[in-house]
Amino acid sequence: MGPASEEPDLVLRPSDILAGAVTPGSSSVFVVGAYDSRITFYSQQVRALELVHALHEQGRLASNPKCAVIGGGAAGVTAAAALALVSQGPVDLYESNPEMLALQSASTRRRLDPHIYDWPSLHTSDPVAGLPILDWKTGTAQSVRNDVFMEFNMLALALGGRPARLTRHAVQGIAVNARTLDLSFERDAHADDLPQDIKPNHRIDDTASYDIVVLAFGFGLEPPVAAGISMPSYWLDGGVPGPDIQGKATPRFLVSGNGDGGLIDLVAAGTANFDHQGMIDQIIHQPGIDRVRAALLEIDREANALAVAGQGFDFMSAYDTRIMPALQQIGLPARVGQRLRPGVQLILQTLDPEPLSVGSAILNRLAAYLVIRACDANAITNFQHVNGPALAPIGAPAAPPYPALHWFECGGQVIGADSAIIRHGTARIAVRTPFENLLQDFDVRHRKWRAKYADALMVPQLSADARALFGRAARRQQIPSARWAARDEEAHAPLRIGLETEGPNLVWSGDVATTDVGQIWTSSQARAVELYCPPFPGELGPAAAAAFRLALHSSRFTMFGNVGEWEAYAVQRSSGSPHARHLTPPILRAGAPQGIAHSRELMTTSNLATALHQALDAWLLAALDGRIIGFTTDGADPGSVVTVPMAGDVLTRMAGVWAVWRGQFQASPELLNRFLRLMLCARDDEAARDEAQILLGPKKLDSITRAVVVCLAIASGWTELGPVADPPGNLTLARATGAPWSGHACGADLIDREPLQLAAARYMWRTEFVVLPMIDTPLEAMLRADVALADVGAEQPSLSEAEHATSIMLSTDPAFRLAARTSLAALAAHLAQAEVSYFTRLRRDVQEAQA
């Protein structure tokens, strides 16, 4: 489970995962999911994958142990598949029911969503779970179950029947021996079983020994009768609150229990035509809902802190005072009121004095709160909260205050209802009883472990390391992809990335980590890339430039976000750039891709910008290295990028200089970044930093290559020349006498939207020397062209004034080219002459000033 913040002590290491899962009775028996909160299909899968990843990383699977997984729910099926995928030993999956994932197999009215209940965290509307194995997309519980089960079967087929599925195998206990864990279980009798061993029910007791056991027994089943009412399971369609009761102008619904199941059914009972998903969609997509996001998260943190201390929390009052005014401003309560079941009378019965509980998901809690307040605001609807230790059925009162089909007593109050929905939870003790010898005080230990890592565990996330492990293993075994996705060729599926705000920080997520974004430029010819970026550029700070740089230089890249905001930003920094030509902005679209909710990286905006720029700069350095080595080895110039022939001894010296520079760049990312960005931008100030960095990428690689090669040639003659991290400029030249000279090597296309050839001679350079690698014209010719184009009366320097410039101007003019292709000595002499001319000019200026 990935970190919930940048604090290192909140990151769960593999050893921490095992510490939270190992049982007191054996160091080889582990529990997954049965004692945790935030129980969803997706979160149980994540917990299972993290446990198996931890076993792998801690070396527990190195000897290919024989493993058993007990329980065929979401956690058990996922754990068994993961164990079989990353180890070679036998893996047996035990399930007492006739089929795996039995709870969801017949549920067509309940929906499963991988992320929605993590709202208001990020990417909650992403319909794709985004798991490396057994992945799925939001849908009915039955459809999700069928998709996952089909993937499980395909995985087992690819792995030669591993894991083995042992359905109708009821595990009765585990004996811990010196070297093995011995399971005892009851199964159906086989034809080869001894007749005397077969019970009257055609079952037989059996045993098997294992090295590692994973307990994924879950939570058991709901009792079929609760509070005197026959109550279908939450997962059965009959357990969903039904349509309006015939002939009832004011239908009365009693919901008992305020866990997630109870709150979901409270919303379903309170709204017309059961549409819990519709209610959820209305909340998270309501314009302006982000106004309450921070307050909701803060309220949740406060409530969790009090829960750890054993205290309750009044969510109703907190929501009334801290979020309701904003909700009313955006019109959400009124919209929810329109969804109410006509005349509905809701009663919520809880053990706690507060109707809403910290154990429920924020989204379910907020939906229930809105339904409750909508009932209060309507003249013919009503909400009543009743709390007490027990809900007991009673006969109808002699003089009932209203007609009702069922009557109950709770805490001295008499309650009548036409329909009762009892959500008191499942029979957890029953499924744990066979393992009491192993569990002992596991619940106490696990509670303390959860408290220690509360923030990291609140929203379970699959770590990048776990994702990489199972992704590699699945590809290696050629496990087929998810059935729901149209993935004809996985290698050509789009790479999907998300970039969103979370408070003052940013979250980067999806298929590519920040450290690996360079691979997008490498693979962009083959793989399309989709970046979901709903924040406006101004909300991202410097990270906007880093994300746009990535997009600008990728050949098949689509940015999803606010098209109007990003279009203005894109044009100013691409086709309208004052520093470069021939930059086409990326495709911009509204909407969002799927499958980006995984591998979250939480960073400050400046840290994220730095991480992205450094990864992209590293890609450029590697690309440059390949080109420069080829050029300095034998003068190879594919595509005629450099077009400046060099003598053999010059190339040899350049190779040595590049080896030194490359080492400096690898040691100092800031040195590399400054060197490169000033290569493509004449402006040397922080205000232009983002604009300059955006230019650095494959679309300008030819220009950068030529500029760096020319600088290396100059460094072969000026032997003390090297890159510099501090302004002014990006080069420094150590001298035998006097202070070092600063230099600016600039291969920009434009200076303030004017061609470099015209603007370079009169630009106010801040360094002692300027290298213009893209200009083949002598300085004097540049000056004449500039004067010829200048309007009469314009404030342009005259040729004589420009001759007093205080910088040495070096271009690849004919004299430079002749020297470079002649010999190293000729090139050194050419540079020495440039110094002589510079000092001559300085002396003349001094004499004229003294005259």
Image: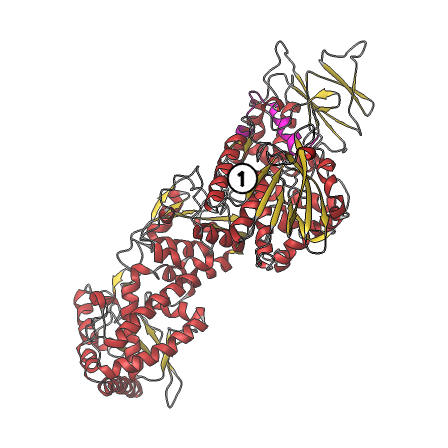
Residue 730 makes an appearance in the image: yes
Q: Is residue 729 magenta?
A: no
Left or right: 502 with respect to 667?
Answer: right
Residue visible at 72% across and 20% down in the picture = 229
**Residue 733, percent across and down?**
36, 82
Dot 1, crowdedness within 10 Å: few (<14), some or many (≥20)?
many
Q: Is residue 264 magenta?
A: yes
* Frontmost residue, 746 versus 781: 746
Residue visible at 33% across and 68% down in the picture = 624
Q: Amino acid at mark 1?
A: Pro
**Residue 550, percent across and down?**
38, 55
Q: Element under label 1?
A: loop
Left or right: 321 with respect to 568?
Answer: right
In the image, residue 267 above or below residue 646? above
In the image, residue 159 above or below residue 688? above
Quadrant position of residue 832: bottom left
Residue at numbered disc 1: 114
In the image, residue 699 above or below residue 268? below
Question: Please, which colouring scheme is shown?
Answer: secondary structure
Q: Which residues are magenta?
A: 257-278
* Frontmost residue, 204 versus 212: 204
Quadrant position of residue 675: bottom left
> Main structural element of the magenta stretch: helix, strand or loop?
helix
* Frontmost residue, 14 versus 794: 14
Left or right: 94 with respect to 499?
Answer: right
Residue visible at 38% across and 55% down in the picture = 520
**Residue 177, percent across and down?**
72, 53
Quadrant position of residue 433: top right
User: Which quadrant of the figure contains the C terminus?
Assistant: bottom left
Residue 293 makes an appearance in the image: no
**Residue 232, percent across and down?**
65, 23
